[in-house]
Amino acid sequence: VHRNDELPAGYRTVIAPPPVAEYLELRTRSGLSSRRKDQAEAALTGSWFAVSVVFEATGETVGMGRVIGDGGWCFHILDMAVLPEHQRRGLGDVILTMLLDRIRSEAPAGAFVNLLADPPGRALYKRHGFVETAPHSVGMALITDSLLTERAH
Ligand SMILES: CC(C)(COP(=O)(O)OP(=O)(O)OC[C@H]1O[C@@H](n2cnc3c(N)ncnc32)[C@H](O)[C@@H]1OP(=O)(O)O)[C@@H](O)C(=O)NCCC(=O)NCCS
């Protein structure tokens, strides 16, 4: 199993998600779709496990990853994000190692860990043992519309 838990100098990990404002910014600045504050608040308190990487010179959160899961057998990795100016230094590798270590240590053996792999992360995920589920199982997604009037935010 590939694992690298050594961050480069100048960075430290925090076993928690970033604050909401930093989370929203980290997503958009790393190229992920933007989310609303109400979505972020629920997402971060609802995570099963989350890791942030802080750049010590500024105190800014520059990377993160998190897991939602049932604690038993099924876990979904998402929000793998590192700011562009901090990418390709091994931060993503350390974040993913920590998420998988936690699943291996807390969940009963045989857990099913999945994610939807955008191109920037694919090589990283493969190194950690992820394999494509297609063609048998293809990732599918749906974005809901509220049946009621959209709440004001
Ligand atoms: C995916 C993502 C989180 C990876 O973060 P990262 O910190 O750049 O990841 P790493 O540095 O561990 O690895 C990335 C690459 O840098 C390389 N690398 C690591 N340390 C390096 C170093 N010191 N010097 C040069 N290259 C290095 C790795 O070998 C890897 O190369 P590869 O992908 O060609 O195999 C980041 O690219 C990102 O946020 N992308 C935009 C958002 C996104 O698409 N997220 C994934 C959603 S599924």
Image (cartoon, rainbow, N blue to C red):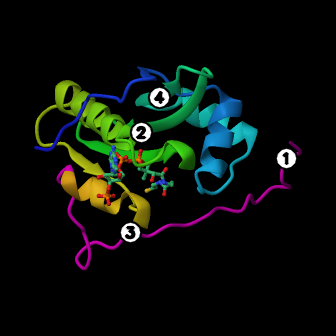
Nearer the camera: disc 3 or disc 4: 4
Is 8 or 146 nearer to us in this picture?
A: 8
User: Which amino acid does the dot numbered 2 rest on?
Assistant: Ile
Query: Which mark sits nearer the N-terminus, 1 or 4?
Result: 4
Q: Position of residue 73 (x, y in %)?
A: 23, 41
Q: Is residue 90 above or below residue 119?
A: above
Provide residue 106's location: percent of width, then percent of height: 22, 25
Disc nearest the viewer among 4 and 2 = 4
Q: Is residue 107 visible?
A: yes
> Which tag, 4 or 2, sits closer to the chain's start?
4
Q: Quadrant of the N terminus?
A: top left
The amino acid pointed to by label 1 is: Arg
Label 3 to label 1: alpha-carbon separation: 29 Å
Residue 53, label in figure: 4
The residue located at (36%, 36%) in the rendering is: 95
Q: Residue at x 26, y 48 (%)?
A: 113
Write the start and end of the magenta stretch as one range.
128-153
Give how far apart the Cα atoms at labels 4 and 2 are. 18 Å
- Is residue 114 covered in magenta? no
Q: Which mark is residue 68?
A: 2
Density class for disc 2 (Cα within 10 Å; few <14, some 14-19, many ≥20) is some
Q: Which mark is residue 151?
A: 1
Q: Indicate whether residue 149 is drawn in magenta.
A: yes
